[in-house]
Image: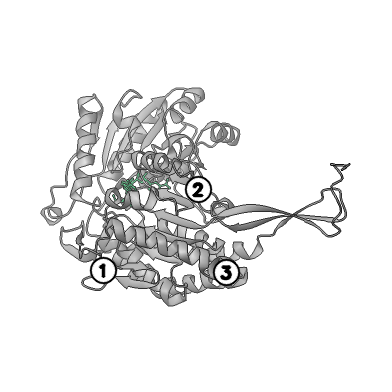
């Protein structure tokens, strides 16, 4: 960063082989936050080769589980030591508020702590095959060389959901953060080196996904690709990997419904519902895969509920994430803001009713950043692109329903299936609706929370595979059945002459 080498290959820091660099822009004011090395295709291939060599010839895959768990704990300690520095880098790079970045670093720490515990207690499965001379066991082994590709919205958090279980399982890996937000991952790999991760086990390349993609994914030396990002990229990677029969897990987008029934309950429950619908869609300016971007509200309360939301949305304080007064920051880049603006223009042309936002803020203090106002469209329906396509911006659409069956139908009317929320005071209804929704996470009278111990992932085109929880570790493991006969004897099938 800023002249220091940023690519980490085989335990060595190095510059890009062609000397290429990239300016990383702070989206709050358009300034250059850092200049980093931009890997070439050859650098990416070197990184995969280094991970391959560390897996095939290195000690890490066979390192005792207790040592691996201790390393994960040591990484968690260093994350807490460097919490503020990492949070500052994340805010400079993504624009999110410093308060949110600090929570991200705490969440990253929790993921390492969780997997440190889990790898220590994973037991082999012993099977009784009905022969006292046979010991039959299913054991877990590391899957091999992993390519870990992360998006820009939660750069270090999303990468940690991959690196922690991959390390815990005994894999070697190449990490590729988004070209837009590599800063926290570069700092984190320095921290991994300090913690004592052996050379070649974690390798880092950053640069354009389009340019490095083939080296990382169309590569027979790779055993597993874990990708988090958009649907189109996920599709491309899955197709390329299929040629090599490489295992792929893709965590993709979402168009997440938040269903509010009229039987919401007390005045407190009403306030909580308004607050959480607001937070669920406008936190981090909507750049959240599980953002509740579709409000599906019962007709009888819809006007009052939307009016309450508009009032709150117009009070959201936007600003530089470094300013403690800011409640939300800018969009990640000018290019991304242009995409969000195109979605808004399309919604207006399709007849959605703009009730607030729909433009850049007028405050001159925000003019240099890529800010966009919290935006709400009422009178939306399922035919509109704004209801079906992920905008990844601060945009809420409102659809109305009159009965439970219609609410469920609308909630499931998306090609995605990442997350959903349901608000009702009727427990039986809550259970019925939660079970009927085809989404990977469903919150009942809450929204947005997760834990490292519970699986995260999507139904439908939100992807396949799961991160976090025991399944998130199992993704990085192969299962081997060992059949051991302690008193060998002839099979007795072929009798001879
Ligand atoms: P993206 O454009 O798909 O990029 C994701 C990552 O893939 C980036 O590191 C990108 O590199 C890289 N990439 C791009 N083209 C590639 C290729 N051909 N081969 C290999 N890698 C390639 O997504 P994004 O815009 O960064 O992230 C937003 C998306 O992520 C949204 O759809 C969001 O819903 C999704 N997301 C999902 C989850 C989840 O848990 N399901 C969590 C967070 C985000 P460059 O940045 O250099 O292009």
Q: Tell me what residue is drawn at x 23 percent, y 24 percent.
A: 351
* Above or below, 381 relative to 374: above
Q: Earlier in the sequence, mark 1 or mark 2?
A: 1
Respond yes or no on whether mark 2 lies under 8 Å from ligand 1: yes
* Residue toward you, 202 or 487: 487
Q: Does dot 2 land on a helix, a strand or a loop?
A: loop
* Residue toward you, 413 or 407: 413
Residue 475's disc is: none
| Closer to the eye: label 3 or 2 | 3
Say which quarter of the image contains residue 483.
Answer: bottom right
The residue singled out by tag 2 in the image is: 456
* Residue toward you, 493 or 300: 493
Q: Earlier in the sequence, mark 3 or mark 2?
A: 3
Q: Tell me what residue is drawn at x 34 percent, y 57 percent.
A: 177
Respond yes or no on whether mark 3 lies under 8 Å from ligand 1: no
The residue singled out by tag 3 in the image is: 69
Indicate left or right for 318 with 464 as reference. left
Residue 15's disc is: 1
Label 1: few (<14), some (14–19) or many (≥20) C-alpha neighbours in 10 Å: many
Name the spot of residue 447 as percent of width and height, x first. 45, 45
| Closer to the eye: label 1 or 2 | 1
Say which quarter of the image contains residue 47.
Answer: bottom left
């Amino acid at each position: 960063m800023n002249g220091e080498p940023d690519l980490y290959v085989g335990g060595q820091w190095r510059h890009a082989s062609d000397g290429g660099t990239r300016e990383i822009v702070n989206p709050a004011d358009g300034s250059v936050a850092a200049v980093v090395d931009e890997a070439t295709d050859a650098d990416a291939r070197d990184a995969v080769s280094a991970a391959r060599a560390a897996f095939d010839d290195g000690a890490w895959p066979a390192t005792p589980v207790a040592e691996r768990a201790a390393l994960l704990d040591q990484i968690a300690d260093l994350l807490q030591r460097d919490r503020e520095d990492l949070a500052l880098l994340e805010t400079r790079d993504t624009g999110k508020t410093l308060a949110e970045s600090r929570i991200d670093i705490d969440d990253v720490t929790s993921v390492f702590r969780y997997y440190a515990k889990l790898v220590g207690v994973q037991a082999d499965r012993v099977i009784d095959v009905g022969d006292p001379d046979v010991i039959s066991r299913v054991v877990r082994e590391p899957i091999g060389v992993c390519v870990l590709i992360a998006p820009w919205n939660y750069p270090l958090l999303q990468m940690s959901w991959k690196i922690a279980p991959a390390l815990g399982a005994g894999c070697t890996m190449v990490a590729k953060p988004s070209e837009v937000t590599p800063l926290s991952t570069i700092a984190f790999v320095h921290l991994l080196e300090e913690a004592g991760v052996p050379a070649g086990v974690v390798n880092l390349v950053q640069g354009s996904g389009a340019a490095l993609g083939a080296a990382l994914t169309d590569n027979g030396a790779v055993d597993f690709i874990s990708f988090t990002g958009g649907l189109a990229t996920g599709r491309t990677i899955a197709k390329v990997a299929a040629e090599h029969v490489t295992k792929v897990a893709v965590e993709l987008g979402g168009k997440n419904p938040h269903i509010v029934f009229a039987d919401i309950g007390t005045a407190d429950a009403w306030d909580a519902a308004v607050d959480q619908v607001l937070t669920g869609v406008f936190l981090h300016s909507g750049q959240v895969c599980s953002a509740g971007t579709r409000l599906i509200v019962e007709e009888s309360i819809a006007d009052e509920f939307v009016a309450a939301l508009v009032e709150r949305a117009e009070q959201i304080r936007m600003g530089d994430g470094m300013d403690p007064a800011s409640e939300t920051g800018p969009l990640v880049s000018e290019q991304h803001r242009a995409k969000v603006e195109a979605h808004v223009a399309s919604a207006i042309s399709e007849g959605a009713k703009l009730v607030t936002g729909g433009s850049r803020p007028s405050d001159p203090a925000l003019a240099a950043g890529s800010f966009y106002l919290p935006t709400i469209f009422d009178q939306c329906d399922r035919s509109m692109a704004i209801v079906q396509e992920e905008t990844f911006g601060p945009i809420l659409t409102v659809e109305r329903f009159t009965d439970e069956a219609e609410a469920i139908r609308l909630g499931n009317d998306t090609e995605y299936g990442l997350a959903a929320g349901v608000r009702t005071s009727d427990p039986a209804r809550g259970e019925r609706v939660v079970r009927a929704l085809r989404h990977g996470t469903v919150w009942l009278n809450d929204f947005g929370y997760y834990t490292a111990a519970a699986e995260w992932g999507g139904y439908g085109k939100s992807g396949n595979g799961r991160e976090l929880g025991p399944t998130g570790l199992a993704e990085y493991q192969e299962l081997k059945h060992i059949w051991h006969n302690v008193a060998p004897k002839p099979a007795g099938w072929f009798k001879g002459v």
